[in-house]
């Protein structure tokens, strides 16, 4: 059980950060070629035979700060970056802005996934202008998947 579940994860981290080379640059290259914006906050996880590469887009001080992802069968090559699909973004109706710089967690032994991220403090975040990204609150929301493995857009909660 241990090797079946954790070995792909251990190999992933070794491939991305081992051998003196940060292989995440290979992901950046594929994103660049596909004309997808990468800013910071990369995060990689493994689920059901797929590797998910997630990152934050735009400046942390921008209301448009958000999270995109791509998925692949390989931990070091994006076969099809699926246009850098947006998984988490602002919700002006709820005064939620600057959703980014995240991590993903899985409840052990389940297919229950969560995204942890920060956003502008609400309701006054936008009042700080360009410094709004320095006034943050930490959030966690449930993350769901479609039958084909793609991630459903996360709706930020209050």
Image: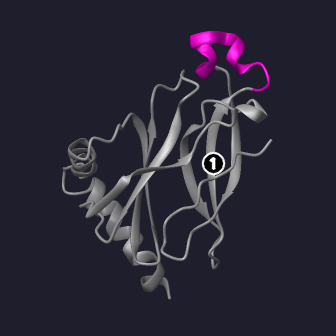
50 sits to left or right of 132: left
What residue did someone put label 1 on?
Answer: 116
Q: Position of residue 60 (x, y in %)?
A: 52, 26
> Relative to residue 26, is residue 60 depicted above or below?
above
- Label 1, secondary structure: give it: strand
**Image quadrant occupied by the C terminus:** top right
Q: Range of the magenta residues?
A: 122-134
Residue located at (24% from left, 46% from top)? 25
Q: Position of residue 67 (x, y in %)?
A: 51, 43
32 sits to left or right of 90: left
Residue located at (71% from left, 20% from top)? 125
Q: Is residue 8 magenta?
A: no
> Relative to residue 75, is residue 97 depicted above or below?
above
Residue 32 lies in what quarter of the image? top left
145 or 56, which is in the foreground? 145
> Relative to residue 65, is residue 76 depicted above or below?
below
């Amino acid at each position: 059980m241990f090797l079946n579940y954790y070995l792909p994860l251990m190999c992933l981290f070794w491939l991305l950060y081992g051998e003196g080379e940060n292989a995440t640059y290979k992901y950046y290259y594929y994103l660049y070629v596909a004309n997808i914006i990468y800013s910071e906050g990369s995060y990689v996880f493994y689920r059901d035979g797929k590797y998910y590469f997630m990152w934050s887009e735009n400046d942390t001080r921008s209301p448009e700060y958000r999270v995109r992802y791509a998925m692949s069968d390989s931990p070091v090559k994006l076969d099809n970056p699926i246009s850098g699909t947006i998984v988490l973004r602002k919700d002006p109706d709820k005064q939620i802005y600057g959703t980014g710089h995240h991590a993903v967690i899985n409840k052990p032994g389940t297919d229950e996934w969560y995204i942890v991220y920060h956003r502008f403090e609400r309701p006054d975040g936008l009042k700080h202008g360009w410094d709004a990204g320095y006034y943050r609150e930490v959030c966690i929301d449930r993350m769901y998947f479609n039958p084909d493995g793609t991630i459903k857009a996360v709706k930020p909660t209050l």
